[in-house]
Amino acid sequence: MRYPTQKLANLYFMGATGLFLAQVLFGVLAGAVYVWPNFLAVLLPFNILRMIHTNALIVWLLLGFFGATYYLLPEEAERDIHSPFLAKLQFWIFLVSAAVAVVGYLFRIHEGREFLEQPLYVKIGLVVAVLIFLYNVSMTVLRGRKTAVSTVLLTGLWGAGIFFLFAFYNPGNLVIDKIYWWWVVHIWVEGVWELIMASILAFLLIKLTGVDREVVEKWLYVIVALSLFSGLLGTGHHYLWIGTPGYWQWIGSIFSTLEIAPFFAMVVWAFYLTYQGSRQHSNTAALLWCLGCPVMAFFGAGVWGFMHTLHPINFYTHGTQVTAAHGHLAFFGAYVMLNLAVMTYAMPSLRGVQPFNQVLNMWSFWIMTSAMAFMTFVLTFAGVVQVHMQRVVGGYSYMDVQDQLRLFFAMREGAGLVVVIGAVLFAYSIYGPVREQLTRVPGTRLQPEPAE
């Protein structure tokens, strides 16, 4: 580790890991309500459990992105982070804002808009933290070396900050509300977050494979172009049935179909670079996460998204368990696995030890990935049954259909418990005891990096 300010990432990774464990725990509690409808009905109703589950997901993923940026940016810019003090201040403002939001949810204080339930004062706190972050990293890049990785990363981060501002706009008209609501929710996860994903993945592949930076950057530009071209107008597949003009059915169907292209390109990119790479990096677990990330993102966001994005199909499937299947695997593959990959790569150098507990780490990979794949298939089958009974054949009430899906929900709950086990195992593998301590030599790295 060349730059002392890279250690700032450790604070963010620890916060992200803690919230990751909380997120999967609340997910299991929310899943239990599908099996036992009166479970925690008075103490923690389902809407509160789900609210905490989804909000914890967003917050810990953002903390992971912040930590990854503070770790890789000094390497890319060839200088330390502009202000370590601001980085620490940002962390505590962001974490306290998130904690205040959760406490508010427990006391039924929220705005009620899905994913954007945070009260106004919490949103203001989050924006202040993000503005501090954007200033800090922008000054770092402007005063240092400019690379494709840092440029694309900064574009994605600024895009995320700008589009979050639409969360403050809450019109009374439901159609207009949903139009701008998707500018946050969709353009984040299927637009600017993809830029963040691609740039972090590019950094990791450069370090792990030893492939020349110019080759990686050419692929990176292609993926970014595909993401922006398809992702922005692909927002239209959310406009199909909310009262917007009919032309959105065609715009949404065509461009959201193209959204599979950048994810497929990422799969080809990762495996091609790994095959071409001449370097055998000691951190095998990090490479496993790097390869698993685009594969699972391709299936979750690409294939499962395509399955029900065309408007004649979406007419029947929107808002069903098919959507839940797509959402779970897409988030896990694209962003959860990305954060776990960068943590697995960075934590050995942040702790000053050789890559450790790699077997446990790789076990956590296979446990969580298998459980999420099983959960996705179960929810997909549940969605098909739900669509058939509730929207094709018809005549069945909503609760009658839910009763018919209890077996699927029980299997989903079992898969969720396995995910929790995998998450705990991952946390132990990167923060647990280490057998061998490295001799600390100032100015040296744990592993020789490729020449750039």
Image: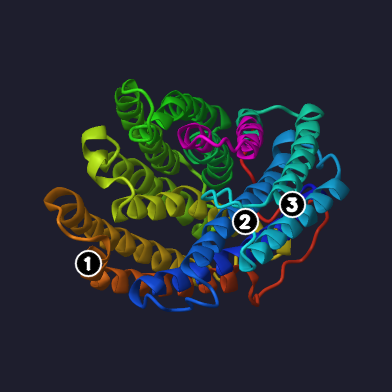
Q: Which residues are magenta?
A: 155-181
According to the picture, the residue beneath numbered tag 3 turns out to be 1
Tell me whether the residue at label 2 lies in contact with that at label 1, contact meaning CB atoms closer than 8 angstroms: no
Residue type highlighted by circle 1: Asp
Q: Is residue 173 one of those drawn in magenta?
A: yes
From this view, report whether residue 195 is shown above or below residue 359.
Answer: above
According to the picture, the residue beneath numbered tag 2 turns out to be 110
Q: Is residue 165 one of those drawn in magenta?
A: yes
Q: Position of residue 14 (x, y in %)?
A: 68, 63
**In the foreground, 159 or 241:** 241
According to the picture, the residue beneath numbered tag 1 turns out to be 400
Residues at marks 2 and 1, CA–CA distance in whole angstroms: 31 Å
Residues at marks 3 and 2, CA–CA distance in whole angstroms: 42 Å
Mark 3 crowd level (few <14, some 14–19, many ≥20, 10 Å Cα) = many
Residue type highlighted by circle 2: His
Residue 287 visible, this angle: no
Q: Nearer the viewer, mark 3 or mark 1?
A: 1
Picture residue at 37% right of the left edge, 75% below the top: 37
Q: Nearer the viewer, mark 3 or mark 2?
A: 2
